[in-house]
Amino acid sequence: MLSDGCNYDSSRLKLETPRAKPVDPGPSLVKAEYSALSSMRFSSLVGTFKFDWSGLRQSDANGGLRTARTALSVGGLVRLVESLSLQTSFGLEHTAGPRTRTIISSVWQPTKAGVLFAEWAGSEAGTEARRVGGRWWLVPRTLAIDLGARYVPDGPGWSDQRVGVSLNFGL
């Protein structure tokens, strides 16, 4: 969204088939995630609308399709200076029950090939997590390396460290 394009729309679908227990002979769960993002640019402000859904299906006797998370949010990104932006998001989320959630991120793009971010997420219960990370484009807008970690205040500290590869197809 930091690029100079007018609009940015994306959809993401992720399917996983892990084993529910290590002793299972094969996949026993199906996990699905769907995310859709739409945005509009107004001068140096980008407004966003996002929908997220995730669910799972178990192969045991109780296994039906079950929604794990649904979220609907609106937000914006404003460019403070050429390479530094502030992004916010506010929305409703339903996991174990309904709640509101707010995310504030600072985004720094030191080069066209890389971006770094620091993020705070909270709800009416207070701070839920802090995240830091980055993306380096090996092939612009197509192939990237992602790095990140999340800090949970009431949990194990820094967790969920990630190194990933992102491949985008222009469909």
Image (cartoon, rainbow, N blue to C red):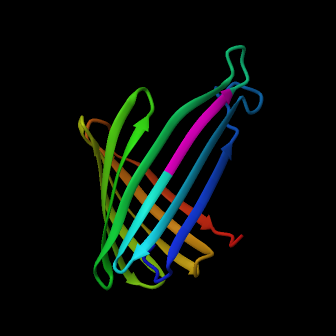
Q: Residue lying furthest top in this view?
A: 61
- Please, is residue 25 above or below residue 45 in the view? above
The x, y position of residue 114, in whole percent, is 45, 78
- Image point (57%, 39%), residue name: 54
| Residue 134 relative to residue 36: left or right | left
Whether the magenta-drawn stretch holds residue 2 is answered as no
For the C terminus, the image quarter is bottom right
Magenta span of residues: 51-57
Q: Quadrant of residue 58?
A: top right
Quarter of the figure with residue 170: bottom right
Residue shown at the point (68%, 22%) measured from the top left: 64
Answer yes or no: is residue 146 visible.
yes
From the top left corner, tell me how far across and down residue 152 is, in percent.
Answer: 31, 43
**Horizontal side of residue 156 vs 167, given as left or right:** left
Q: Quadrant of the N terminus?
A: bottom left
- Counting the numbered discs, the total is 0
Does the magenta-highlighted stretch encompass residue 56?
Answer: yes
